[in-house]
Amino acid sequence: MRRTRILTAALALAAGLLTGGPPAALAAETPKAAVAADTYTWKNARIDGGGFVPGIVFNRSEQDLAYARTDIGGAYRWQEASKTWTPLLDHVGWDDWGHTGVVSIASDSVDPDRVYAAVGTYTNSWDPGNGAVLRSADRGASWRKTDLPFKLGGNMPGRGMGERLAVDPHDNDVLYLGAPSGKGLWRSTDAGVTWSQVTAFPNPGDYAQDPSDTSGYASDNQGITWVTFDESTGSGGSATKTIYVGVADKENAVYRSTDAGATWERIAGQPTGYLAHKGVLDAENGYLYLAYSDTGGPYDGGKGRLYRYATATGTWTDISPVAEADTYYGFSGLTVDRRHPGTVMATAYSSWWPDTQIFRSTDSGGTWTQAWSYTSYPNRENRYTMDVSSSPWLTWGANPTPPEQTPKLGWMTESLEIDPFDSDRMMYGTGATVYGTEDLTDWDAGSKFTITPMVRGLEETAVNDLAAPPSGAPLLSALGDIGGFRHTSLTEVPSMMFTSPNFTSSTSLDYAESDPGTVVRVGNLDSGPHIAFSTDNGANWFGGTDPSGVSGGGTVAAAADGSRFVWSPVGTGVQYTTGFGTSWQASSGIPAGAVVESDRVDPDTFYGFKSGKFYVSTDGGATFSASAATGLPSGDSVRFKALPGVRGDVWLAGGAADGAYGLWHSTDGGASFTKLSNVEQADTIGIGKAAPGASYQTLYTSAKIGGVRGVFRSTDQGASWTRINDDAHQWGWTGAAITGDPRVYGRVYVATNGRGIVYGDTSATDPGTEPEPTGACAVTYTVTNQWPGGFQADVKLTNTGTAAWNGWALNWSFPDGQKVSRMWNAEHSVSGTTVTARNVGWNGAVAAGSSVAFGFTGEWSGTNAEPASFSLGGESCAVG
């Protein structure tokens, strides 16, 4: 689930988009520049999750204090009151974009206000900067930074092992950090301010996923993988005597010091042929538990074992729940119930098919039970139930054949933790979300426990493209790993990602400016079409037909009236078609790999850019001609947009620090461009609704202006710019896409590489949350069909007031616990027991006295009574 992100970052770096040299000297503090900015409110367009969560850490001394780390999307703190996650690293800026990758996080059990994060995304050339250790004395609300003399790899192979960063539980000024790339073990004795290598540590590791990988990604030595203290060997104020360290070395995976890190030795008798992904100590019973795999993960793993090491006697015991011959995965996700230390859990982290597995023992690994097991193959019996109604897209819209199920229990399950204060609460990370339960001990009682997403507030998608149509859904997205979404509401989780087909990653999308119901998207898929079309504003899709040679999505453009499309896919040259892509023809006069866009007025005009040249077609993409424009960026790190409503008005952003770099404007269809002298660097360009009283639409860009990197807005055609983000809201790299909202002045949507879709609203207009209609309403609810376990219902909603509605959201609760399976002519979401049905783009306007109808299928058991009440905008509706 991270191949796309790796590629995205690599291509961006190769194109020179991500600039900035290595950090300053060790332990340096770098002040941030302050620039006056408009006051904006920033939120995420909710997706909830969407990426890999390799680490979850509970504080051992304060209840409900927990942190999560992501591989490219920063770190988060748990908010118990709201059951949500709060992002902690949004301050990371453009030049330090790599510091959004978190390789480890540590919460101080002596002083719970202290938290530390080891940050850095890649150890190879893809990330130009070194790693750092961030330290906070206020639980991540603010940070100070110590730069390191080596790189860290939050998105590298082995990132699910850990934790590599640890605080001494007795002398909390002492921290250890395990480094990759042969850099060894490091220690701080001043609460993370300065660091030095532990020269006495004998083994920097030697395991690499693929030593032959010339990119340096898979060939890097995964190094020191975890540090664990034995708290029984110390006392308050003095350093803990016994420390265990995991090393990426299959013959020498575990080392120990018994003199507070002065000397180290390989533990005798340990198993070989494996890497220890986790080392968790039960000090009460004197056991060190170890989860082993034959590879570093998080995707791979063929064999694995679980071992228990008796710290007092030196005895090793194989406590694996299955025979080695029956494993096709490695073990990880190791945790101990601190209230009942004999209870141990672990995961089969790399078991993608048919599902991950979770193992549980209540006798220190003597015997085990499993989260699911076969009754008679392929039938399964689960000890759990899953409720993903808060994130319904986690089903992937799939209908798998047993033994697969949807939603899956998970995959890439490297992090699983039992709350040290609550034996009933467990959280675990997957490649797409954080799952958890609050009735875990029902497992032992023989009854089923419930697993739900515990991920709200944690947004971790990598965004490749964004579109904000003038009507219909306010936002469409092209995302890495999970394809993309149609957001009919920015504050609710969409019911499903784009399907039919499901791209592993969407790379580009566009809509017809004068017919926004017509939408096209392209992306990557192992088998099947790389292009899809929609005629209902992205609510439903059908796959197109690929031209010969296509191997990836590339970029795509829709004609202004939706009559034709131009596609620049990976693997072959630029293509054009009339209709919906059943037959493609090669465009002439434009090189393969060009970025393509459409004029937003003239359906016959398309534009392209490649290697410093701008190309124009006036015959629907059949032929292109190179423009005479000069002075444009020589590389391919360029994004450009045509202005809606004005023929031939084009804005182009991009470049590299060693050449032409900035923002250009053309008013003659690309025949010539003028570079804006007041923009030093620009990487994206977006267009939104004009400011009140302005005659030209609003421009948005991720750029460097006045010596400051940020997100900027211009309401006067680029003559002047206002920074609209601030130093607390930077989100690392924001160079993929940006767009304004054509319906709400000041609203802007920003693509991040791991923090999802961020949108901002200006305080000047303060649109706040999306308005919902209120007033008189009536509802007719009819069950039209019913069968064992299922039913179909139709709902008619009537506006009985005197004012028209511009969008609606109807709420109700089922009396017998019924659940909606699929809804049409409306989008639905569920919060607790409340169902919300919202309009889709075409049926939001309901005149006074008019009605709108939608339907759904659902599940029921026992009885299927009709809802007793409905509400619209907080007002009750009459029920007919």
Image (cartoon, rainbow, N blue to C red):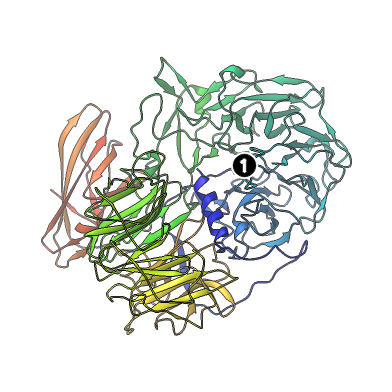
Residue at the extreme front = 589
Residue at the extreme left = 849
Quarter-of-image position of residue 329: top right
Q: Position of residue 594 (x, y in %)?
A: 41, 61
- Classify residue 369 as left or right of residue 25: left
Can see residue 254? yes
**In this orientation, which residue lies closer to the viewer: 218 or 165?**
218
Where 695 falls versus 77 (above or below)?
Answer: below
Q: Position of residue 596 (x, y in %)?
A: 37, 62
**In this orientation, which residue lies closer to the viewer: 611 or 454?**
611
Residue at the extreme top = 376
Quarter-of-image position of residue 500: top left
**In this orientation, which residue lies closer to the viewer: 275 or 586?**
586
Badge 1 marks a residue whose secondary structure is loop
Q: Give the amino acid at mark 1.
A: Pro
- Residue shown at the point (70%, 36%) measured from the top left: 207
Quickly name the residue at label 1.
157
Q: Position of residue 337 (x, y in %)?
A: 63, 32
Crowd rating for badge 1 (residues with CA inside 10 Å; few <14, some 14–19, many 20+): many
- Classify residue 560 as left or right of residue 701: left
Can see residue 767? no
Q: Position of residue 57 (x, y in %)?
A: 62, 44
- Residue shown at the point (46%, 33%) measured from the top left: 409
**What number of labels is visible?**
1
